[in-house]
Image: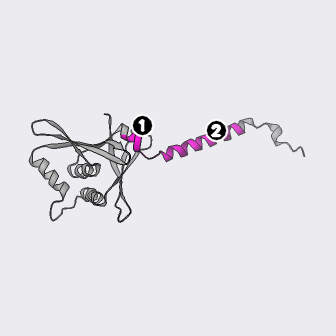
Amino acid sequence: MSLVRMDIHTIAVGGGVVPSLIVLTTHPTDGSDPIQLPIRIGTVEATAISMGLDGSPHERPMTHDLLKSLIESLQAKLDAVAITDVHGTTFYAQLFLKTEFGEALEVDCRPSDAIALAVRMGAPILADERVLNAATLPDFKGVERSEKQQELERFHDFVESLSPADFTDDL
């Protein structure tokens, strides 16, 4: 499994028939545009992630705050979370934990829960390259650049094909 570091780009909290959405992005080091991975999530989950990013204290612990407290009470560490698979529109994730004795644990979970916990615990969010290959948004900027390059090449070919005779007035 080859994992790529992701960051939260956008959280859209929907309501009613409008679904909530989180968009994760890569940060390529080679100057190319980031890859965007959209994941549809529930409204409650989107709110939980937003609250974790906000960092403001709550009167009572929310579910993800409870899980964070439990992990810390057990003297374990959340090393990372990863979006590991996708089937149709269903994404799968794993929590990568390390116990106080150094034992590595992988726990299956929903991506929204993994991300909500990661933002609370400062853990990296990762995605398997297979998921990125299967479910990312098209690179619209890349398509636009390619079209502009083709247009410039056609113009260059046109200019190269011109001769002085093309500018005489033979009417």
Dot 1 amino acid type: Asp
Prevailing secondary structure class for the magenta stretch in the rendered image: helix
In the image: residue 28, left or right of residue 112: right
Name the N-terminal-most of marks 1 and 2. 1
* Quadrant hosting residue 95: top left
Q: Secondary structure at mark 2?
A: helix
Number of the label disc, if any, that sits on residue 153: 2
Depth order, front residue of 88/104 = 88
* Quadrant hosting residue 155: top right
Magenta highlight on residue 130: no
Q: Which residue is mark 1?
A: 30
Q: Secondary structure at mark 1?
A: loop
Q: Give the answer, above or below, for where 70 lies relative to 134.
A: below
Q: Give the answer, above or below, for where 111 lies relative to 100.
A: below
Locate residue 138, reporting x and y percent: 47, 45
Extreme-top residue of the structure: 1
In the image: residue 157, left or right of residue 52: right
Locate residue 27, reporting x and y percent: 37, 43
Extreme-right residue of the structure: 171
Q: CA distance from mark 1 to mark 2?
A: 25 Å
Dot 2 amino acid type: Glu
Question: What scheme was used to colour the molecule?
Answer: one colour
Label 1 packing within 10 angstroms: few (<14), some (14-19), many (20+): few
Q: Which residues fall within the magenta stretch?
A: 131-158
Magenta highlight on residue 132: yes
Depth order, front residue of 147/39 = 39
Q: Residue at x 50, y 43 (%)?
A: 142
Locate residue 153, reporting x and y percent: 64, 38
Q: Residue at x 12, y 48 (%)?
A: 72
